[in-house]
Image: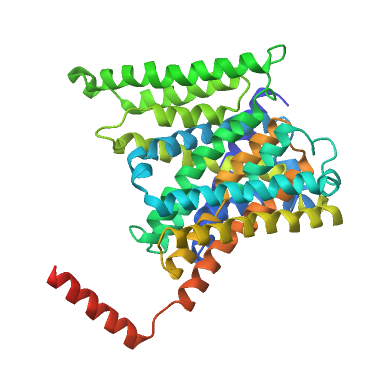
Amino acid sequence: MDTETLVTVVIGDVALIVVVSWLLGAAARRCGQPAVIGHIVAGIALGPTLLGRLPGNPTERLFPREVLPFLSVLSQVAIVLFMFVAGYEIDARQLRRGGRAAALVALFGLLVPAALSAGAVRLLPGVFSAVDPRHASGRSFLLFMAVATAVTALPVLVAVIRERGLAGGPAGTVATTAAGLMDVAAWLVLAAALVGTGHAPGRPWSLTLLLIAVFVGGMFLVVRPALGWWLRRSEALVANQVTIALALALGSAWVTASLGLHPVFGGLLAGLVMPRRDGVPDADVLRSMEHSAGLLLPLFFVTTGLSFNIGSMDADAGVLLALIVTVATVGKLVPAYVAARLGRLDPHQSALVAALVNTRGLTELIVLNVGLEAGVIGPGLFTVLVLMALVTTFATGPLLSLIGRRNAPEPEARALSLTGSQQKWTSE
């Protein structure tokens, strides 16, 4: 395929992906799900799972092998920008103020599913090796599986909280803070799992770890103060902070990739390092980076869908899927509910928190793609884990609706409650 034809196909593919993702995203919203669910379904539908099974294999015709590296590069840029936004939005003051309930939910909601997953890998190695015989062993695989079942998708969780009107309430606040804490811890564990697995041949893992530590320290101790000083200067106020943020995100991603870690870690680190004004992210930077990432994110879902094929699953994969979904769901819902109750939330709010932190979605898919690209897992296990992410994310909406219906007060009781609340506020 010559260069002109290649450019034409890439442009056409991008247009197709954007349109299909937009349509299915709108359909997902009408069904009470976040738009990202529709984007994920679009990626799967355009891949071998659906479109590829039609006569003539339209997937192969639309996405020939020569085009895939270019789509992959664009999708990785989108993920780096998305991770920058995720890091930039993390409010350290909110994490400190989250309170006892959020800390307990984060601790229980991370450690219990991770421990259950690690225990399953140790006690049932044959179940994992039947699906992924080349990778189902070793330190990196064990840590990766712990992260894959324990992670919570903070961006999807925030979207669900906003759409359900839970923002600012006890359940929304606790779930958001706990998810932020869990995400930070999960990415740290994932980074540890991938040390030594990246493309840095001939470099001892101990040296790689030292270089990573030096880079992280330099970003916080040198780059962040320097950027803060520059942005505070009067003549720098006219500077385009979006350009600085973009350069910081891509440059940091380049360094982490060179050190053998995935570029997403560099994007997340850049977001954490980017200076804020009075502890608040700059609205222009946040909006511009979020929109840029959002425009390209559908490409990530399609490249994921091209590696995902439900038709390749057999009975062994079905057994493993049932095991992982059980570990991931029970390991989140039960500990999170217990932790919220210990944090002095009532049963209704505790149930809402448990359902919310069981959301995985986009963050889970990023983790899975990182593991697949690093060679920690194979395509078979990747397909099983993507299905687990879809099942747990799809379940969030119905679970919240079920909890809401079961705990909805009767009209008379609701009126009495409102009257009591009004009297309380009046007296105060």
Q: Is residue 376 above or below residue 223?
A: below
Name the quadrant of the N terminus: top right
Q: Which residue ends up furthest to the bottom in the rendered image?
A: 412
Residue most extreme to the top: 202
Rendered-image quadrant of the C terminus: bottom left
Question: Which percent across, then down, holds residue 372?
Answer: 70, 36
Residue 4 is left or right of residue 278, and the answer is right
Q: Quadrant of residue 224?
A: top left
Question: Which residue sits at x=53%, y=35%?
Answer: 79
- Does residue 286 sit above or below 37 in this rendering? above
- Name the foreground residue: 4 vs 106: 106
Left or right placement of residue 390 versus residue 426 in this view: right
Number of disc labels: 0
Q: Residue at x 56, y 27 (%)?
A: 263
Residue 188 visible to the viewer:
yes
**Res 314 seen here:** no
**Where's residue 27, x and y in %?**
53, 62
